[in-house]
Amino acid sequence: MRELVDAGQGVGMILPIAGITIQKFLRKIRIVMMSILICGLW
């Protein structure tokens, strides 16, 4: 249990930085997915 708590605290510190990175990554994926869908429709 203690290990989980330590991991949780570590994740809590990393999350803000990771969250920004993930948002940028998801935005890129969304653009790519839209491009594929648009190309697929044509």
Image: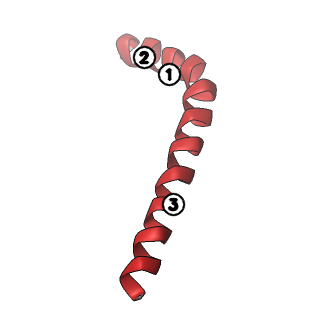
Res 30 label: 3
Q: Residue under circle 2?
A: 7
Would you say the residues marked 1 and 2 are in contact, meaning their CB atoms lie under 8 Å apart? yes
Across and down, in percent, residue 32 comes to 46, 60
Residue flagged by tag 3: what amino acid is it?
Answer: Arg
> Relative to 32, does residue 6 appear above or below in the rendering?
above
Task: Compare residues 38 and 24 and report the one nearer the observer.
Answer: 38
The tag on residue 11 is 1
Label 3 element class: helix
Disc count in the image? Answer: 3
Q: Where does the N terminus fall, quadrant-wise?
A: top left
* Marks 1/2: CA–CA distance: 6 Å
The amino acid beneath tag 1 is Val
Task: Compare marks 3 and 1 and give the one earlier in the sequence.
Answer: 1
* Picture coordinates of residue 18, whole percent (x, y): 54, 29
For marks 3 and 1, give the one nearer the viewer: 3
For disc 1, the neighbor class at 10 Å (few under 14, some 14 to 19, many from 20) is few
Say which of 13 and 23 sits in front.
23
Q: Residue at x 58, y 44 (%)?
A: 23
> Residue 37, relative to residue 28: is it above or below?
below
Horizontal and vertical percent for residue 37? Answer: 42, 77
| Residue type, label 2 | Ala
